[in-house]
Image: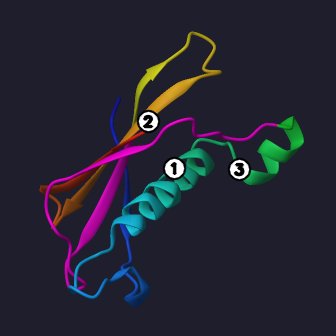
Amino acid sequence: MTPYVVPIQLRWTDIDANRHVKHSSYYDFGAIARMNFFVAHGLSIEKMREFSIGPVLFREEAVFKREIRYEDKVTIDVRIVKASPDYSRWSLQHKIYLDGNTVAAIITG
């Protein structure tokens, strides 16, 4: 599957006292990318309400590889790494990139 890529606009509130992106913001980036992915594939919040469904995270793990600073250009991709035959359960992986090619973190959930 070709990854779905989302540009991330860093906010001042994403930065910690060491002038790097704080760890909790990485998870927020994953949530933003997931929702954009769902909407782009026809599963809007309205559709979820209509079908009485919603995404539920049972587990989410981040592996941090590089620090991100406020000035960095950041993108995150989304790809399905496994799914049940009826897609009732699935796992997504996100890779957060600096300048389009350096992996800063990998989030799996």
Task: Say whether residue 99 is left or right of residue 82.
Answer: left
Separation (CA) of disc 3 from disc 2: 17 Å
**Mark earlier in primary sequence (3, 1):** 1
Magenta region, residue range: 53-78
* x and y, in percent, of residue 80 in the image: 42, 31
Q: Left or right of 11: which side holds 19?
A: left
- 67 sits to left or right of 109: left
Q: Which residue is mark 1?
A: 34
Q: Amino acid at mark 2?
A: Leu
Residue, disc 2? 92
Residue depicted at x 86% and y 38%: 52
**Mark 3 and 2 residues: CB-CB less than 8 Å, in contact?**
no
Say the numbered circle drawn on residue 44: 3
User: Which amino acid does the dot numbered 3 rest on?
Assistant: Ser
Q: Position of residue 73 (x, y in %)?
A: 22, 74
Query: Mark 1 belongs to which amino acid?
Result: Arg
User: SS for tag 3?
Assistant: loop
Report the mark closest to the observer, 3 or 1: 1
4 falls in the magenta region: no
Q: Quadrant of the N terminus?
A: top left
Instruction: Tell us which disc is closer to us: 3 or 2.
Output: 2
